[in-house]
Amino acid sequence: MRPAERALPPFGRQEAELAREMAGMLRLSVWHAFIAIPFFVWLMHPQVPLWRGAAWAAVFLAVELWLAALSASFGRTPQSLWQTRARYLPLREAMLASSLAWASMMWLMLPDAEGPYRLVTIMWLVGAFALVCLLLAPCRDLQRGYIVGYWAYPLYRLHQEGGSLYLAILIGCAIYILVQWEFLQSFNRQLQDTATLSERNEAMLASVRALHRESMAKKALLEERQQVLQSALRQMRRLAESDALTGCYNQRALRERLDRCAEASLLSGRPWSLAMLDLDHFKQVNDNYGHQVGDRLLCQAARLFESLLPEGAVLARYGGEEFAVLAPEMEGMALLSLMEEARTLLCTTSLEGLPVGKVQTVSIGVAGCRPGEPVRQCLKRADVALYRAKQGGRNRVRLADDAERG
């Protein structure tokens, strides 16, 4: 394990946030050094040998390039704690090297002769110190060593120079270091608070996302249960409206649809029609072959009738062996023709349970209904037409007369 890694305190989310803050500040500062350092070397060239200035600038800019590469490795998007820590360790080493490069400026660039250039160098040193302190603010464990290493030689030179001017500069630098130290402590606390707040915000955001996922899961479960409930309600409604034996609508459901059809006809002005169907001699079937055969016969007849009905037409078991057909927006003659097809189909079909050669016939009465005509009157007219079909010999279809209307 490297020394920098052994000295590193526990690395958590807060430390990772501070490391990313430092890398972001470094990305902004590195390229400024490539403008300032060559300018400073050019400015000091008349007072400092060129080789010393060039050597110092080369070392310093090499360290800055190192910092640029390491800070760029953090990227723009958040990374895991392990990835951030792995990139933070070499960045700390580069920051130590950069601080040494800044501290060596006084040793390499301070003119030997007295004059205003020495004051310019000292001012430059103060400005560079403030900049590096900001860059090192997230690394609180490096600040003390950096301050001592940075100012040890400059303060020693100022003390050695003697004189009231350099003594005043020495005192001013000491006061400046103390003020800068207090500022760094405050600034570090602000960074810590910012990192803590960011960590809490991330935790809160993660909690909100978890709640959102839980809410969406509960919503999906609720919607699924609602669909199951609606399906069950539809099934219950269907069972309540269905005839238990044949599966077609029962008389209660038929009467509701008759009322709705009459209301719709009154609003639209279009006619509608109704048919009553009665299986001929059905009591003989029950007496001769048993009620089970009669039940199967009713179911088969219902399936045959339903197979001929157009979309929107309704077949209902009216009672016993009697059925009814409701045909919205269909005139009486059209329903008469359709019922004739139903009669022919039934009497030409071999039904299960009946002996070979035995057929089942049906008598049908059809009533064409006008808009506004009462439902009770329509049922009565269809029933009268059915009676006439039976009286006429059965196995036939009859249309109610318009004269039968009240």
Image (cartoon, rainbow, N blue to C red):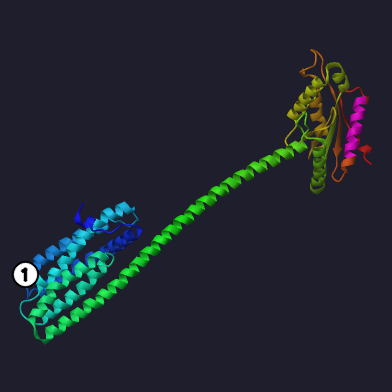
Q: Which residues are magenta?
A: 377-390
Q: Residue 65 placed where, x, y %?
A: 19, 60
| Label 1 neighbour load within 10 Å: few <14, some 14-19, many 20+ | some
Q: Residue 313 placed where, x, y %?
A: 76, 36
Using the image as rendered, state which of residue 240 and residue 166 is in the foreground.
166
Q: Is residue 379 magenta?
A: yes
Q: Quadrant of the C terminus?
A: top right
Q: Residue 315 placed where, x, y %?
A: 78, 33
Main secondary structure along the magenta-highlighted residues? helix
Along the horizontal axis of the image, is 190 left or right of 383?
left
Q: Residue 273 placed where, x, y %?
A: 83, 37
Which residue is at a point 33% across and 69% down the rendered structure image?
189
Along the horizontal axis of the image, is 400 left or right of 85?
right
Up/down of 27 relative to 373, above or below: below
Say if residue 28 shows up in the picture: no
Which residue is most to the top? 356
Identify residue type, mark 1. Leu
Which residue is at a point 86% across and 35% down the rendered structure image?
367
Residue 191 quadrant = bottom left
Up/down of 319 relative to 79, above or below: above
Which residue is at a point 23% across and 60% down the rendered structure image?
92
Identify the element where label 1 is drawn.
helix
Using the image as rendered, state which of residue 96 and residue 374 is in the foreground.
96
Which residue is at a point 89% across and 30% down the rendered structure image?
386
Instruction: Report the residue marked by disc 1.
Output: 50
Q: Is residue 93 magenta?
A: no
Residue 287 quadrant = top right
